[in-house]
Amino acid sequence: MTNLAPLILFAEITTVDQLIRAQIAKSLPEGMAISHLSVLNHLSSVKNEKTPMQLAKSFHVTKGAMTNTLSRLATSGYIHIRPDQNDARRKKVTISESGLEAQRSAINTITPVLAKVINKLGQEKADSVLPIIRQLRHILSD
């Protein structure tokens, strides 16, 4: 492994990320961004309410960036934001029924795009690289 190998590896990962994000963004419903879908996916998979700060930490973004995303989702009616009963300075966020419908619709529109990529790559290769990608994520999350 040369000294450039780590740079080449992460350049490839970054390029793949940019390319798949562009493909997904093109196929999302009008007005929905990838960040919106990511938050809706997260909220649809958790049972309890989340604070904007908890969401910001989950997505490794600033509270301001998360507040902007949440504001757009609330304006669209996809989430509910309410004051925390124990601390009025804090907010609690949940997904709305409309948000669940929007999330399902978006998933249905991007699934063929993602399936096409996996079909070209081959399911066996995709399955073999997944543990490595997960391991990288865990290493970088620490």
Image: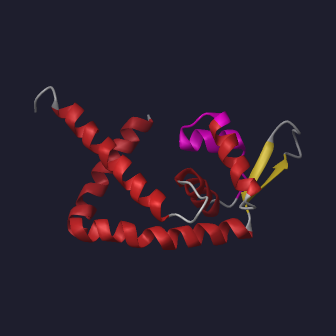
In this picture, is 99 found above or below 85? below
Q: Is residue 61 inside the magenta stretch?
A: yes
> At x 68% / y 65%, what residue is drawn?
99
> At x 29% / y 67%, what residue is drawn?
118
Magenta segment range?
48-64
Residue 9 at x, y percent in the picture: 23, 39
Q: Is residue 39 inside the magenta stretch?
A: no
Q: Which quarter of the rendered picture does the N terminus lie within?
A: top left
**Picture quarter containing residue 10?**
top left
Residue 70 at x, y percent in the picture: 70, 48
**Picture quarter containing residue 57?**
top right
| Residue 50 seen anywhere in this rendered image of the structure | no
Residue 64 at x, y percent in the picture: 67, 34
* Residue 21 horizontal side relative to residue 71, left or right: left
**Picture quarter containing residue 38?**
bottom right
> At x 65% / y 72%, what residue is drawn?
101
Q: Residue furthest left?
A: 1
Q: Residue furthest top?
A: 3
* Residue 26 horizontal side relative to residue 127, left or right: right
In this picture, is 67 found above or below 104? above
In this picture, is 38 found above or below 1? below
Q: Which quarter of the rendered picture does the C terminus lie within?
A: top left
| Residue 127 seen anywhere in this rendered image of the structure | yes
Q: How is the image coloured?
A: secondary structure
* Residue 59 horizontal side relative to residue 112, left or right: right
Frontmost residue, 123 versus 33 = 33
> At x 63% / y 45%, what residue is drawn?
55
